[in-house]
Amino acid sequence: MYKSKEFMIKIGVLGAGHLGKIHIRLLKEIDKYELVGFYDANPESAALVEKEYGIKRFDTIDALLEQVDAVDIVTPTIAHYDCASKAIKSSKHIFIEKPVTNTIEEAKSLKGLSKEANVLVQVGHVERFNPAFIAARDYCSNPMFIETHRLAQFNPRGTDVSVVLDLMIHDIDIILSVVKSNIKRISASGVAVVSESPDIANARIEFDNGCVANLTASRISLKNMRKSRFFQKDAYISVDFLDKKVDVIRLNDVVGEIDPLSVTIDLGNNKGSKQIYFENPTILPTNAIKMELEAFADSIISNTTPLVSIDDGYKALDVAYKIIEKMKLTSNFTEEQPLNQ
């Protein structure tokens, strides 16, 4: 176990693209880490990053692994498994961006390797650390209907995979984190508009406890939107992941005389009345990516399971591919990646 005040975790970054550079900048700000250096497969861009951020560039992954306690994998998804398995075999703890791997088989293999090597793996489902979701999380005690919309303006980056793996997987992970029940049924449809794989998709997930989640994701929208709505007994919680806002509407039984200034609804048939309470939880101004990297450090220091574990990453990917498989039945596309039933 590491002692945070006495020991800085030596970490290296694999991948220095757009997101990798953000991680490099934030890791330099976190006092629990000593950023040893980075590796990127493109020598020209790596040289620019080395100069811009003033950190050491390693010529090989193996050379970097020899100098660190943990690695932050921010490579393209197709390289996740090779990088992660190599790091695990070197007994290094891993932060790995979402989706955890390119295929279900790779994710299952990483689960086994990480447990065998007794290393910690955290998956970068960053919306778990979104300050709006953090503020709303405790209100979502038993949601029975969930509706999510994740819409983005078109960006060629990421169109090599379906919108399910590109965008919807964020909401899949959030839903799985709040619904404590097994999945009973999945149905889905999608349309490829400007890409070879679906650019807009809708999925319906039914759980054994009766909860139903309806998810919509699009990367050809005219505006950006990242909203989720959670409905449960006597409560409605709206979370705006983009604008960092939360609205909570709760219903309580009216006892005694009704306050004429309060907002109430009459249930009819002598069932009494409910008083409506409106809440806007305080949203703390935080950087979600920095928070998840700090949480990764804390899990290493305390030797505890990361908040978003390898199991969580596997479950989200598994549901994503089940949705993709269902879309094949109703859509005009063929996804190259297999679905593990």
Image (tube, rainbow, N blue to C red):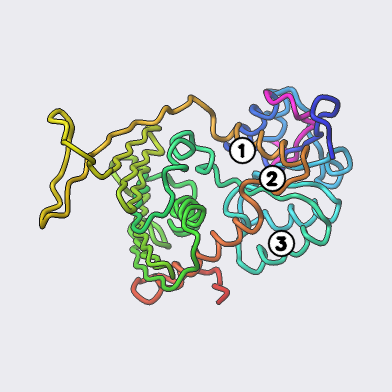
Choose between 239 and 221: the one closer to the eye. Answer: 239
In the picture, which quadrant includes the C terminus? bottom right
Q: Secondary structure at mark 2?
A: strand
Q: Residues within 10 Å of mark 3 (few under 14, many from 20)?
A: some
Q: Position of residue 141 (x, y in %)?
A: 44, 50
Residue ID for mark 1: 292
Distance of mark 3 from mark 1, alpha carbons?
Answer: 20 Å
Q: Which residues are magenta?
A: 29-44
Instruction: Please give the name of the residue rendered at 65% of the width and 69% of the height, measured from the top-left corner.
Output: 105
Amino acid under label 1? Answer: Glu
Amino acid under label 2? Answer: Phe
Q: Is residue 14 above or below residue 10?
A: below
Q: Residues within 10 Å of mark 1 (few under 14, many from 20)?
A: many
Instruction: Please give the name of the residue rendered at 42% of the width and 67% of the height, measured from the top-left corner.
Output: 209
Name the quadrant containing residue 263.
top left
Residue ID for mark 2: 95
Choose between 205 and 102: the one closer to the eye. Answer: 205
Q: Is residue 322 above or below residue 219?
A: below
The disc label shown at residue 111, or none:
3
Residue at far right of view:
66
Amino acid under label 3? Answer: Lys
Instruction: Please give the name of the residue rendered at 35% of the width and 71% of the height, measured from the top-left corner.
Output: 331
Q: Position of residue 27 (x, y in %)?
A: 69, 29
Query: Residue 112 vs residue 231: left or right?
Result: right
Query: Residue 63 vs residue 257: left or right?
Result: right
Q: Position of residue 93 (x, y in %)?
A: 77, 46
